[in-house]
Image (cartoon, grey):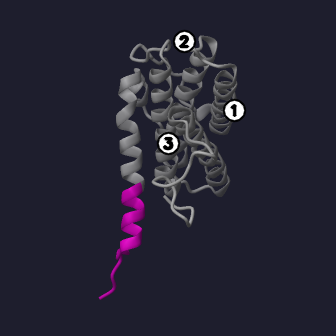
Amino acid sequence: MTQIFAPSRRGLLKWGGAAAGVMVAGSLLPNFGISAALATDLGEGDVGVLNYAYALEQLEAAFYSAVVDNPYSGATKNEIAILADIRDHEIAHRQFLKKALGKAAIPSLEVDFSAVDFTSRKSVLGTAGVFENLGVAAYNGAGPLIQNVDYLGAAGSIVSVEARHCATIAAMTTGFNAKTVGAGIVDRKGLD
């Protein structure tokens, strides 16, 4: 008897992890008023994955634009410059995905950031941390679902930038930097 479908443990973990990552990432979106837009048809296959990423990038670009346009109380010039750089990256990601999707792109989203206190450093950086971790989780979760190698390569580049954003926001939030990382954070082998 020939087995038609015999998934390996690794295959199950890979696809299960991808599905879980996309579902967890999506569960955070209703808090920002875009769940209705995502309830529309995102498309199938690579188009669906790219439209999901496009929605996330629209959300991030809009958030960082609002942050830079009206910096939180006590924001330093360096912090504003860092957040402006992140904004510019998110805008570039958004534009890349919009161009890649062409006519298959979902419409521009209307977001609701009323839950974010843009005057508070803690609120802004906390929200930024959620967005950046969400972006990394979404790209890592969706990566195995992307079939086109060009899109996969682009997604890999984008997720590496999102991971650097995570590290930057964490450093801004906690004060960790190359001089302060030590015992309890990273072991002697450079691992956490």
Q: Nearer the viewer, residue 20 or 166?
A: 166
User: In this rendering, is residue 148 above or below 77?
Assistant: below
Residue 135 % position (x, y)? 51, 40
Crowdedness of circle 2 by 10 Å Cα count: few (<14), some, many (20+)?
A: few
Q: What mark, if any, has residue 92 been given in the picture?
A: 1
What residue range appears in magenta? 1-17
The label nearer to you, 1 versus 3, is 1
Residue that numbered label 3 is attached to: 48
Instruction: Name which quarter of the figure residue 153 lies in.
Output: bottom right
Circle 2/circle 1 CB separation < 8 Å:
no
Residue 134 % position (x, y)? 46, 39
Circle 3/circle 2 CB separation < 8 Å:
no
User: In this rendering, is residue 139 above or below 86?
Assistant: below
Residue that numbered label 2 is attached to: 73
Q: Is residue 161 left or right of residue 41?
A: right
Helix, strand or loop at mark 3: helix
Q: Nearer the viewer, residue 83 or 95?
A: 83
Answer with mark 3 or mark 2, whichever residue precedes in sequence: 3
Question: Can residue 7 be found in the magenta stretch?
Answer: yes
Looking at the image, which residue is at 46% across and 23% down? 122
For the residues labelled 1 and 3, the Cα–Cα distance comes to: 20 Å
Instruction: Kindly identify the amino acid type of the residue bearing the numbered disc 3.
Output: Gly
Answer with mark 1 or mark 3, whichever residue precedes in sequence: 3
Instruction: Kindly identify the amino acid type of the residue bearing the numbered disc 1.
Output: Ala
Crowdedness of circle 1 by 10 Å Cα count: few (<14), some, many (20+)?
A: some
